[in-house]
Amino acid sequence: MLFNSFVFALFLPTVFLLYWLIGSKHLKGQNILLLIASYTFYGFWDWRFLFLIFFSSIIDYYAGIGIEASSNESKKKWYLYLSIFWNLGILFIFKYFNFFIDNLNILLHLEEHPPLYSSLNIILPVGLSFYTFQTISYTIDVYKERIKPTHQLLEFLCFVSFFPQLVAGPVERARSLLPQFFRNRRFSIQLAKEGLRQILWGLFKKMVVADNLALAVNPIFANPQEFQSAELLYAAVLFYFQIYCDFSGYVDIAIGSAKLFGFKLSANFKLPHFAVSIPDFWRRWNITVSTWFRDYVHIPFLKNKKRTFTTNSLALLLTFTLIGFWHGASWTFVVFGFLHALYMILDRLKFILIKRELLPKMKGSLSTLIAILLTFTLTALTIVFFRAPNLTVAIEILNRIFLFIPDQDFKLLIGLNVLFLPLLLLLELWFRNKEFPFQDLEHDLPRFWRWAVYYIFIYFIIRYGGPKESFIYFQF
């Protein structure tokens, strides 16, 4: 079920009305409704995968209880490894098995028809990468005694499958989201209004900006040999904003939807295109996933190791290569992650221009602007690997960009986004200290102008929404 679909436009208010009709005095009833709604939401794609998410939830639920109840370390580790191996195992089978089989056939020159080793004819369940990471962190935190395991199965099932953030995050930690299912949630008109405003903002970013940008990006990446340097660089920049508006638009709708039911989800973006360095970029982009890898890969790798430049660099290479590979079973994503690891290492060596260290004579806004432009350029170049279907196409695009092939007939393919993309960036910059631009609109504008803004953006969505496309991160 897509957030930008007519079905969801009926589903959300129906669940909302039933939820508050049950009322905050009947917490168990509300949670039962949320579980039914979440499984309905997820089963709308393919009901067969409901068994997978349910079975994963059961394993992790009892693994947490087993860890707490065990008196010896080896048994605790057995429950922990059961959870980790199960979650990574299903992730490997559904997402990475065919990748490794195909590369093994190529490596051993066994790609004849039919190949010696056959791939599996399976599809990737939506949201698998997100909810498996969410439950892995739960069992690890229980094992590390950072949290106590829950003994309430209903609430744990809700935690794993909560429909606003189930498919593409944000990846929530148990210590943040799980306790919210045990607290009485009272209806707040202010929180509901804020949630609706955030949903409106997310729909604008997705349907008006991202989906229209796709009209410019898709034909260029589909046939890069037909375009010259300026157009290809232009497409790389546009795709950066497409994926940002697409993914952050989803997150805004998710967070806004959760607010309607009295829940608070974690922020996942903080204006990454205004980052002043690559490390700053990763503090702003897909925050819940990057901090997950920091806490469960980067920091454990460095534990009990002497902190040298070499060990720190290896930790960065491991962490960011895995972040890239987490996005998809393709060498393009591996290279995307590897390049960001390389950027981080070079940043530590002061090889990359950053705001304070290498621009000491330039003060204030000029220094910041140069740092932002450099960071954005470096990021936009890696995004080519993120978008290209394979390494050959990615290298061809970058090669044509850096050959500086002149084009006397540069085609402006952005269309309506000549207006809407700058409008979005201007609003984000103006309201940069808020969670989203419409957050405090009740205090910023009188009622007449506030409703005028709502109607204008609703009109934009209805009139200028691009062809409906699935959210990009659904494939991960």
Image (tube, rainbow, N blue to C red):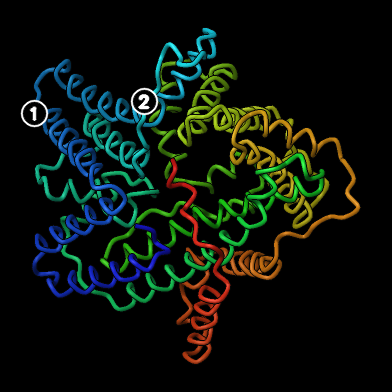
| Residue closest to the eye, 103 or 237 | 103
| Vertical arrangement, residue 89 with respect to residue 371, above or below | above
**Residue situated furthest bottom in the rendering:** 448
Q: Position of residue 121 (x, y in %)?
A: 36, 29
Q: Residues within 10 Å of mark 1 (few under 14, many from 20)?
A: few
Q: Which mark is residue 220?
A: none
Query: Which amino acid does the dot numbered 1 rest on?
Result: Ala
Judged from the image, the secondary structure of the residue bearing numbered disc 1 is helix
Q: Position of residue 384 (x, y in %)?
A: 65, 39
Name the residue carrying label 2.
120
| Residue closest to the eye, 307 or 330 | 330
Name the residue carrying label 1.
69
Judged from the image, the secondary structure of the residue bearing numbered disc 2 is loop
Q: Residue at x 70, y 61 (%)?
A: 414
Position of 274 compared to 230: left or right?
left
| Residue closest to the eye, 112 or 455 | 112
